[in-house]
Amino acid sequence: MIADRFASDSPRMIRLDETTSTNTALAAMPDARHGTVVITDCQTAGRGQRGNSWEAAPGLNVTMSILLEPRSITAAGQFAVSEIVALGVANIISLLARPDDRITVKWPNDIYAGDRKIAGILIENTLAGNRIIKSIAGIGVNINQPRFESDAPNPVSLLQLTGIEQHIPTVADLIAREILSLADLYDTPSRLQQLHEQYISMLWRRDGFHPYIDTATGRRFSAAIADVAPTGHITLIDESTSHRHTYAFKEVQAVID
């Protein structure tokens, strides 16, 4: 659901023709504050989670980073920042896609249309003790790219889904405003559980049992999502044993047949 009120802070958009990484560029700006956004037409060394690369044809997709300065989210509960950003991106893609495109959040924070990846997010937090000083969220959204050349297994763009070209700066502005609105709404201890419930409701494969692989052992098994912890760890219920097991990112992999 799109946030029902505007953020108290509007995004400050900084456009770069080209940069290695919008996250790196934004982190190097000493005057950047909450709501600062860096957007580029061409990112030459874009990064995904844990060193993965991100394919984005220049000028055809949203490639951006936004800086957030959480007020109430602690270092121990920093996954709430990821939930805010993932929901913000998913909400805007849902607005632009068709209802039957089934926009969801694949744990921890990829955005899927059906079983195909339409957006990726990389969160980099700066911590001081038990506080988050700042969070930089790098966001890549496949918008107008007609085809993909890399060996990524399942990419898709909004153009491929709808046949409609979008205005990239407008989409980036919508995403930034939605993220800031959600941050304003949920960055308070009394509403973090509501944020978590919204995130769980948007999860890809949140219902039923689905195939996974334990990356440490190679064992393939069927499981259902039980919960995602404030640390970002996911708990799965093994269908064959009914046992629960908790995994960190990349310790378990969803299987897409």
Image (cartoon, rainbow, N blue to C red):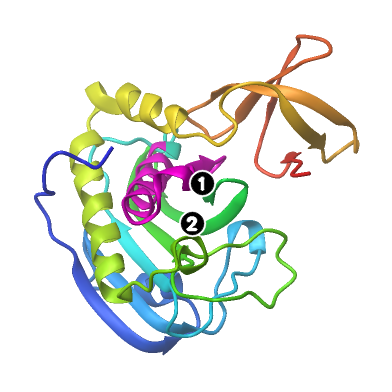
Residue 29 visible to the viewer: no
Q: Nearer the viewer, residue 64 or 62?
A: 62
Of the 4 image quadrants, the one containing the C terminus is: top right
- Whether residue 14 is situated above or below residue 246 in the rendered picture: below
Q: Is residue 196 magenta?
A: no
Residue at 41 percent across and 40 percent down: it is 83
Q: What type of secondary structure mainly makes up the magenta span?
A: helix
Q: Mark 2 and mark 1 in contact? Answer it, CB < 8 Å.
A: yes
Mark 2, Cα crowd under 10 Å, few <14 / some 14-19 / many 20+, is many
Say what amino acid the circle numbered 2 marks.
Answer: Ile
Indicate left or right for 159 with 243 as reference.
Answer: left
* Helix, strand or loop at mark 1: loop
Residue at the far top: name it: 242
Magenta part of the chain: 80-109
Residue 120 rendering spot, x and y as whole percentages: 52, 58
| Residue 109's disc number | 1
Q: Amino acid at mark 1?
A: Asn
Relative to 2, does residue 9 appear above or below in the rendering?
below
**Few, some or many residues within 10 Å of mark 1 (<14, 14–19, 20+):** many
